[in-house]
Structure formats: C-alpha cells, structure tokens
Amino acid sequence: MELQYPKLLQYQSYINGQFIDAHSQSTFPVSNPFNGEHIAEVTNCGIAETKNAIAAGQSAFESWRQLTGTERGQILRRWYELQMQHINDLATILTIEQGKPLEEAKGEIRYGASFVEWFAEEARRIYGDTIPGHQRDKRIVVIKQPVGVVAAITPWNFPNAMITRKVAPALAAGCTVVIKPAELTPLSANALAVLAEEAGFPPGVFNIVNTSNPSEVGKELCTNPIVKKLSFTGSTEVGKILLRQCADTVKKVSLELGGNAPFIVFDDADVKAAVKGAIAAKYRNAGQTCVCANRIFVQAAIYDQFEKSFTQAVRQQKMGSGLAEGVTIGPLVEEKAIQFVEDVVRDAIQKGATISTGGQRLGSDTKTLFYQPTVLSNVNTRMKVFTEEIFGPVAPLFKFYNEEEVIQMANDTPYGLAAYFYGCDHARIWHVAEALEYGMVGINTGMISTPVAPFGGIKESGFGREGSKYGIDEYLQLKYLCWDIND
Ligand code: ADP
C-alpha cells in the first residue's frame, strides 16, 4: 500500500499510549474485498488486553476529566486537523480494507473528522442549569459530569466515521475510551490512534483493542464494572445481546442498529430529483449502510416513469476497484454479505418479482464480491426485500395508491432509523413527516447525515443520538445540587 505517511499503517493494538502485541502473540488476517489479497496480520487481543485497556482508561480518566473543556477541545481540534492533513492516506487505507470507492472514502474521512471538529467546539459548552428552589432557603444547581470509561464497538461499513462519531463526544465530555473496531477493518482504527497520539491525547485516554473474537472482548466490555457506558453501532441482533450483557452493571447504553428505510415518491414529486436522491440513498457504499433506502415506494401515476429513469441511472453505475477512477460501486465486504443478497433476490423472483436491471453476482467467478446494481419491480410485502435489511445494491420498487396505504407499509417494520420521501404538497409533507415512525426523515433529499443534526433511531433501530448539541449528553450524567442556605 503506497502511503505518503507510512506510519499510519499499524498492525497492533493501541493500549495506554503504546502499540502492543497480544500476550498470546496471536494475530488475525485482514484482506482486501476487491481481490481477496491478504493485506495485514493484526494483533488478536483477548480478555487480558481488554482489561488492561479498561484499567488504562480508568487511570487516565482522573486527570483527563480535570482539564477544562477548552483544553480538551484544543487536542480534539488538532486531531481533526491531522485527519484532514492525512485525508488521502486515511482514505486509501479505508478503501483497501473496506472496498468503497476512494472518493467515497474521502467523503467518509471528511464526515468522520467533522464530528471531531464539532465536538472540539462543544467541549466548552457543557452547560448546567439553575432551577428556582422549591423552598425559600433552597438553591438548586444542575451540573453535568463525564460518565467515566466508555466502550465503543463499531462496524466495518464506516471504519473511520463510526469511531469518531462516538469517540469525539466522549473525549470532549471528559471520558476516556476503549474502542473495539470491526475485525474486517482494524487498520482505519489504528490510523486514527496514530493521529490521536500526535494530537496529544495522554496515554490511556484513547485505546484500541483489536480482536477476531468480538463476543469474548465484547462481553468483557459490557460486564466490566469500570466501564460506565457502551456505545454500539451494528446489527440489531448483536445490539440486543450487548444490551442484555450491560444489564447487570446497569450501564448507560446507546445503540445504533439496523434499519429498513422506506423511500417514498408521491405523484407530485420532482421525478428527476427523486431518482437522484434514490441513487444516493440506495447505492452509497454499495448499499451497505443502515440508512440506505431499503424499500422504494412509488405512487401509481408516476410508477412507470420513475422505474424507467431510475433503472437508466442504475445502469450507469460503474463497478470496480475502489482505487480506480470513476468507480461508483465497490465490492461487498465479504462472501456472507453477497450470499445474503443472492438469497433475498432469489426469494423475490420466486414470489413474482421481475428484474429491471442487474440481478446477479458479477461474472461467473464466485470469488469476486461484486453484485450487480439491481432494480426489482413487481415486488410485494410478502417478500424478504420488504422485511429484511438488504445491505447490498438491490432496490425493490413497490407501487402504492394513496398516502394512508404507504404510511402503513412504511411503518410496518420493527425498525425505525431513517425514512425518505419526495413530494410538493406542504400539508402532506407535514402529515407524512409526523406519521413516519423513524428517528430521521429526509424530505426531498436522500442525504441526511451531518454532524450538526442528531443521528439515531427508534423502535428496534436503537436509542441514543450521535452528533449535534444532543450527542454529548450520551457521555454525561446529570447531578443536581440542593443547597440549604441557612446552614
Ligand atoms: P454487521 O452486520 O455490521 O457486521 P455486527 O453487529 O455483526 O454487524 O458487527 C458490528 C460490530 O459488533 C463489530 O465490531 C463486530 O465485531 C461486533 N460484534 C459482533 N458480534 C459481537 C458480540 N457477540 N459481542 C460483541 N461485539 C460483537
């Protein structure tokens, strides 16, 4: 891998200010999803290293929390600047271990760094409150304090940004962190550790435990009483396990889990804009994001027109190596992912769906992880594409007739992360926006992620918010002081 700053490539785990090997000396392989090439052997930590990282976090917490918000903010700001300075290298590492096109990877680095920039500023705005006393001699003050050591378990689809989105508010609040990155993408996490050290975070404030045994390390993070908070992004299935594991020590928890986003196009929508939005919301990261449009509902009067121009736009997507010019869709991340996509498409076809474009794994070589960008028509609610999070480049188009029907279908899922709709009528926009049971709603846009707004879901998509003025509260606890002024 050609990097301008080769030091960013680290294969160990970062604990208490040092890159270390596992006690067992064991490692696990990391490969490039584009061609299966082996790119690294990474330290395989277990419970002992996890305990060390937690202990390092605990001892660093005592002094880190004493800094002023401005002082913590200055270090965060330097971390942000270093990420922007090394954006090309960070994006290259990301593309090679994850597969997404380089331009998209740069977008992720910018997006990830923007949370660090945002929370560098928020660090000095951790305001409390004064409350008029309930008796004449009482004075009441509310202060906010950092919760303590935070565990962050992050996924492979955004190997950089899912870390910064958790870690930046935690560090701004005065907490210390132990991160367990996804085993498919540990190198992006390690690169962030190199820059964190250069930015000036003291040893123990920022720790990374890499492992190929997430359930063992995850259990330690969830059950260790020193850890006061778990922030997790990943599947609903794993999120439920972690929530149960956190129960015995009554940890504060935030979960950002799976989605099943509806994307609704009403008959008064600007079809061209809706097609553009649907492409952005569906095919980003080859469909592997939790806010990807999962079910596209199009009103009957414009269904044929939308299907035609959407299919044309999908045919223009270019698959290939993330490092190649002009590529918009990379490989899926692993064999399991592609088999899942094949299964949902097979199920849809068996139940009567038709393929407008795509519909297959690329080429006859089953070793490639490319799945053709696909549009399915004539789909219905009995198919897996209605109930399952597809997590691949497959867009099912549903036809609907009226608002009531589409809201019922859109909400007919245990998930509640993101939803999107396109239309012009103002009264309907408010009505639909309020009726959708989702944490985030894009109206006439397919792109909703920004550090200035609260990202997060409801129902089985989780709870807690990341980004915005609300995001830092996940890492703070309220304490109220009641003074009797006569004593
Ligand atoms: P995805 O479907 O995105 O791979 P997962 O929920 O499997 O989602 O993975 C998200 C993160 O959760 C990864 O860091 C993974 O290693 C971790 N993980 C998976 N299983 C467990 C588990 N049993 N305990 C703790 N962490 C886990």
Image (cartoon, rainbow, N blue to C red):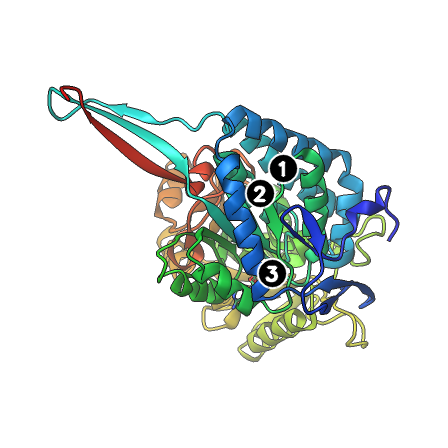
Q: Quadrant of the C terminus?
A: top left
- Residue 31, position as x, y percentages in the image: 77, 65
Check contact, mark 2 vs mark 1: CB within 8 A.
yes
Kind of residue at disc 2 = Val
Q: Quick check: can you spot residue 467?
A: no
Q: Quick check: can you spot residue 184?
A: yes
Kind of residue at disc 3 = Glu
Q: Position of 225 compared to 287: left or right?
A: left
Q: Quadrant of ligand 1?
A: bottom right
Cα distance between the residues tagged 2 and 1: 6 Å
Question: Residue at 55% of width from left, 36% of height from top?
Answer: 451
- Residue 118, position as x, y percentages in the image: 56, 31
Q: Position of 358 compared to 131: left or right?
A: right
Q: Sequence-wise, which precedes: disc 1 or disc 3? A: 3
- Residue ID for mark 3: 49
Crowding near the residue tagged with mark 3, few <14, some 14–19, many ≥20 C-alpha atoms within 10 Å: many
- Residue 459, position as x, y percentages in the image: 38, 56
Q: Is residue 421 above or below residue 349?
A: above
Cα distance between the residues tagged 3 and 2: 15 Å
Question: Residue at 48% of width from left, 31% of height from top?
Answer: 66
- Residue ID for mark 1: 201
Q: Secondary structure at mark 2?
A: loop
- Residue 178, position as x, y percentages in the image: 56, 51
Question: Ligand 1: does it lie within 8 Å of the C-beta at label 2?
Answer: no
Crowding near the residue tagged with mark 2, few <14, some 14–19, many ≥20 C-alpha atoms within 10 Å: many
Residue 218: give its label.
none
- Residue ID for mark 2: 205
Crowding near the residue tagged with mark 1, few <14, some 14–19, many ≥20 C-alpha atoms within 10 Å: many
Between 327 and 161, which is closer to the camera in this rendering? 161
Cα distance between the residues tagged 1 and 3: 20 Å
